[in-house]
Image: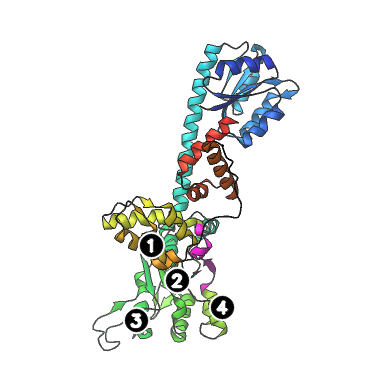
Amino acid sequence: MHDIMIIDDEPTICQSLTFALEDQYHVYSFTDPREALPLFERAEIAIVLLDLKIGGYNGMEVLEEIKRLSPSTVVIMMTAYGTIPSSVEAMRKGAFSYATKPLHIDELEVLMQKAEEVYTLQSKVKWLSEELDKVAVAGVNGLIGESLAMRKIFSLIEKVKDIDSNILIEGESGTGKEVVARTIHNQSKRRNKKFQAINCAAIPTHLLESELFGYEKGAFTGAIQRKYGLFVLAEGGTIFLDEIGEMDLALQGKILRVLQERKVMPVGGIEEVSIDVRIIAATNRDLVKEVKENRFREDLYYRLNVIPIHLPALRERKEDIPLLLEFFIAKIGDRMGKPVEGISHEALQILQQYDFPGNIRELQNVIERAIALTNESYIQKTDLPSDIQKSSRPFFGNTLIPVYVGEPLEEIEKRVILHNLAAFNGHQRKTAQTIGIGERTLRDKLKKYREEK
């Protein structure tokens, strides 16, 4: 049953329309627009029957304010025959249609049904748009999150994706630095060219140089043929230098020259090769500190740090944990052939309290272990590592909710829901997760509470 509103300065019209429509709708009626408009802040009004002239008020101005407060609300203007041209003008300003006075209930009911169909369609479009936004936020080429910190990173990626300036990604191990680098590449104008990644900490210095720059035949024992380095192989694309803070000073100097000249010299070569690549570097070290302690070249740091991106640790964006869990459970469950449906409320609370020193990589490993061990359709607390289980603490605030002897259980439930919703600043997902009900169930109950007012 949709909420509708009648605004007319004649009480008899408000009363008769309410009587005619209250079986199909939950009806609010007002003779003063100043009393009507605040309701849009707390209720979802589907349809408004609005008089074109409301005492000393201009119905056109009230229409504009309604559309500002609730763009999806469908407004039907009520007008006398002599003001039909004004009603047509109102339609140009956002009204759905108009009904002429004296009103004929049969005709009005048909018009209301059409308005209800429009509202339902608009609601579906709005919902789909929000879901698409969630997809855009929740998964951009593997980047997952809807926290403020991640939204800022998504925004920054959008701004810099087609700029060829060097990027330095900083963050703790396991925060997803390579995922960010790949996302930038995959969304950039270079996406049709190669993305070459190398972990500078995993390869000895003498081998790292030849991997990056390549070598000529006979450059050293075992060099039986020419080999192209990653800078050349990434031509037109992107090279990702992971853990660049581990690179020794001598090789740092050679990297600096590549950044300055956009040319590489293969090991054992006599002629430089020009390159066109975008360079993205990453580190889990504090490079400013490394520079001060003479372990990293200051000039190279400034060359790399043209566009800095700092990835927050998972403990700094715990609101993203449910989304990450949903992604990993689906992905890992599919790979293992175990269709795990989700995670229990108790297990979710434990994971949301844990600080994850290993960040997203640790969370992924925890979920992989849990799916491998569980025999349930939902991951349980006992499926989590014992050290994580022991780290959990009660998830209760310090606010008490009164329960009175003889009070109906439904009233107690309502009070619990509304108190928790207020504690989480209206965040429905957190509220639902905390009290152990589904988001859809929570939305249905909140709608019911609004109808009871």
Residue 384: mark in rendering:
1
Which residue range is magenta in the image? 304-318
User: Is tag 2's residue or tag 4's residue first in the polypeptide sequence?
Assistant: 2
For disc 2, the neighbor class at 10 Å (few under 14, some 14 to 19, many from 20) is some
Name the residue type under label 3: Ser
Image coords of residue 408 (percent x, y):
54, 36
Task: Name the mark nearer the viewer: 2 or 4.
Answer: 2
Q: Quadrant of residue 33?
A: top right
Task: Name the mark nearer the viewer: 2 or 1.
Answer: 1
Query: Mark 2–mark 4 contact, CB under 8 Å?
Result: no
Name the residue type under label 4: Val
User: Is tag 3's residue or tag 2's residue first in the polypeptide sequence?
Assistant: 2
Secondary structure of residue under mark 4: helix
Secondary structure of residue under mark 2: loop
Which quarter of the figure is the C terminus placed in? top right
Q: What residue do we see at 45% from left, 74% from top?
A: 262
User: Is tag 4's residue or tag 1's residue first in the polypeptide sequence?
Assistant: 4
Residue 210: mark in rendering:
3
Task: Name the mark nearer the viewer: 3 or 1.
Answer: 1
Mark-to-mark CA distance, 3 and 1: 44 Å
314 falls in the magenta region: yes
User: Is tag 3's residue or tag 1's residue first in the polypeptide sequence?
Assistant: 3
User: Is tag 4's residue or tag 3's residue first in the polypeptide sequence?
Assistant: 3
> Circle 4 sits on which residue?
288
Q: Nearer the viewer, residue 140 or 305?
A: 140
